Amino acid sequence: MDKLVVWINKLWASLILLLISLTCLVLAMTPIWLFLVAKAIAKHEGFWQGINIIALKLGVLFLGGLQAVLMIYFFVWMVSVWKVFLEEYLL
């Protein structure tokens, strides 16, 4: 019975770790989704088209930097969670 409980705990921990990893991926991809939405609604003509082009170029720079920061942050966080998981449950 104890082995079954340990196995179930490891299974739950694995599922939680997978959920955390997927959440990190989704959060890190948020700037790309924001850019794609902004690009999709920037279909105006005339004056607003010029404003949208400038805003999109600035947005690409800002969101690109934010993307890099989030990718690094969530990667480090995910690695630290994996480290704790491996130490607690597998070693």
Image (cartoon, rainbow, N blue to C red):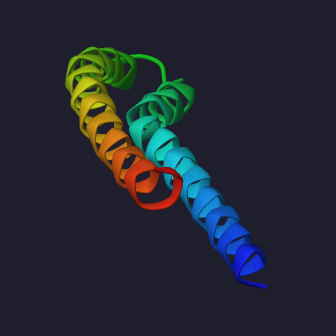
Pick whichever, 50 or 34, lies toward us.
34
Taking depth in this image into account, of 78 and 55 the one nearest to the observer is: 78
| Residue 65 falls in image quadrant | top left
Q: Give the side of residue 75 with respect to residue 14, left or right.
A: left
- Which residue corresponds to the image point at 26% horizontal and 23% vertical from the top-left? 68
Give the quarter of the image for residue 67.
Answer: top left
Q: Position of residue 60 (x, y in %)?
A: 30, 18
Q: Along the horizontal axis of the image, is 35 left or right of 3?
A: left
Is 5 on the left or on the right of 65, as rendered? right
Q: How many marks?
A: 0
Image position, residue 30 (x, y; %): 44, 40
Which residue is found at the position 22% from the left and 17% from the top?
61
- x and y percentages locating residue 57 in the rendered image: 27, 14
Left or right of 53 in this view: 11: right
Classify the position of the N terminus by image quarter: bottom right
Asked if residue 43 is positioned above or below residue 81 in the image, the reply reads: above
**Residue at the farthest front position:** 2
Which x, y percent locates residue 32?
Answer: 45, 29
Q: Which residue is at a point 58% across and 64% down the rendered structure image?
A: 13
Identity of the residue furthest to the bottom in this view: 1
Instruction: Looking at the picture, tell me which residue is in the foreground, 54 or 2.
Output: 2
For the point 49% across and 25% down, the residue is: 39
Foreground pick, 49 / 31 = 31
Dividing the picture into quarters, in which one does residue 78 lie? Answer: top left
Q: Is residue 40 above or below residue 80?
A: above
